[in-house]
């Protein structure tokens, strides 16, 4: 372990085993979107699975809560019951355990890495709907690490109706169920104030701007939390069909290794994951936090959307960290 991984200003949770507290705290009542969670079951829309395996699909206390935003397929109008509360989720259910679900995760990962503005977001969605696969060339070299092969591209359009923009809301103060037969689907979410939370896979220092991300996006980042260089290989209106894990400098895919940064990080992560009550080989996919580094040459649209807080302490990967949730002033 290097000296750089020793927190210069540890969080209150790390030093005393307690949490930072403040009387100035903004909370909001939200409702867990049963409609969306039904899309994340195996098989899809399985009401019994949502009720039986309730701890996989619920919003646990202290989980980061994600809001349901604009659908990727605007022509898809899903009938929903009238509701006065924002619809939220905190996890992607069982998507990582099925081949169909993995297509959705790959599409989200691709969009978050390659969309630099609203127009490119639209072009990427149009490309997902198009069954033709684009050849991947970067400079004078053909890229073999494509994001989607021809067989993959033929499948993507049928999953577009399941995906929406995902926005930061805050941290859950209470437990909320994803199905009304299990209990209350309402959850109180802390949307502003000071809070001690679990850090993600990257080192955080005081003053860092904080964003959230999904665990399956890890290979899109460098070990310090910066995004990998943008593979600018657009062909007209066709996005670069290059895997987001592709390293432009090494001209190959590279994977993220938390152990190389901090050998004890996995132990802390496994300890924190026990609260979800899930098998080790089928972990719950919940949102994590990391420092936000703006790429001035190629700013990523969804990274800026996902900024929601400022760190007020330091932390190693998967350690408690104190943050100030304040989307208006970061």
Image (cartoon, rainbow, N blue to C red):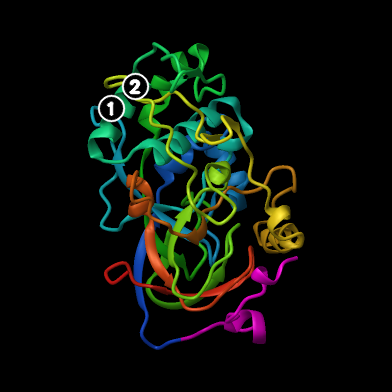
Left or right position of 178 against 6: left
Q: Nearer the viewer, residue 143 or 51?
A: 143
- Which residue appears at 32% of the width and 46% of the height? 301
**Whole-percent x, y for residue 30 in the image:** 36, 61
**Whole-percent x, y for residue 202 in the image:** 58, 59
Q: In this picture, is 200 found above or below 285?
A: below
Label 2 environment density (alpha carbons within 10 Å; few <14, some 14–19, many ≥20): many
Q: Examine the image and state in which quarter residue 317 appears.
A: bottom right
Which span of residues is magenta-colored? 1-21
Q: Is residue 220 magenta?
A: no
* The residue positioned farthest toward the front in the image shown: 140
Tell me the element at label 2: helix
Q: Assess whether mark 2 and mark 1 are in contact (beta carbons under 8 angstroms).
A: yes
Residue behind mark 1:
123
Whether residue 17 is visible here, answered yes or no, is no
Residue behind mark 2:
127
């Amino acid at each position: 372990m290097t000296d750089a991984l020793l927190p210069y200003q540890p969080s209150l949770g790390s030093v005393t085993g307690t949490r930072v507290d403040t009387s100035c705290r903004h909370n909001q009542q939200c409702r867990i979107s049963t409609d969306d969670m039904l899309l994340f079951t195996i098989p899809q829309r399985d009401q019994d699975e949502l009720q039986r395996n309730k701890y996989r699909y619920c919003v646990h206390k202290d989980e980061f809560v994600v809001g349901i935003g604009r659908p990727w397929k605007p022509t898809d109008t899903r009938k929903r019951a009238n509701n006065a509360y924002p619809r939220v989720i905190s996890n992607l259910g069982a998507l990582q355990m099925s081949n169909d679900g993995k297509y959705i995760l790959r599409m989200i990962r691709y969009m978050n890495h390659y969309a630099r503005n609203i127009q490119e977001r639209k072009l990427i969605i149009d490309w997902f709907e198009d069954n033709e696969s684009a050849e991947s060339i970067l400079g004078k070299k053909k890229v073999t690490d494509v994001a989607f092969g021809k067989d993959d591209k033929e499948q993507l359009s049928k999953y577009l109706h399941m995906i929406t923009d995902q926005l930061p809301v805050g941290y859950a103060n209470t437990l909320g169920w994803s199905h009304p037969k299990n209990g209350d689907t309402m959850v109180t979410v802390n949307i502003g104030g000071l809070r001690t939370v679990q850090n993600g896979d990257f080192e955080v220092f005081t003053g860092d701007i904080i964003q959230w991300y999904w665990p399956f996006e890890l290979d899109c980042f460098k070990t310090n939390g910066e995004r990998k260089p943008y593979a600018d290989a657009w062909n007209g209106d066709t996005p670069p069909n290059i895997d987001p894990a592709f390293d432009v400098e090494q001209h190959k895919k590279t994977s993220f290794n938390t152990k190389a940064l901090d050998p004890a990080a996995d132990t802390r992560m496994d300890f924190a994951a026990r609260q979800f009550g899930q098998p080790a080989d089928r972990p719950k996919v919940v949102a994590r936090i990391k420092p936000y580094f703006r790429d001035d040459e190629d700013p990523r649209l969804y990274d800026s959307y996902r900024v929601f807080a400022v760190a007020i302490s330091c932390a190693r990967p998967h350690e408690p960290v104190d943050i100030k949730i304040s989307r208006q002033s970061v």
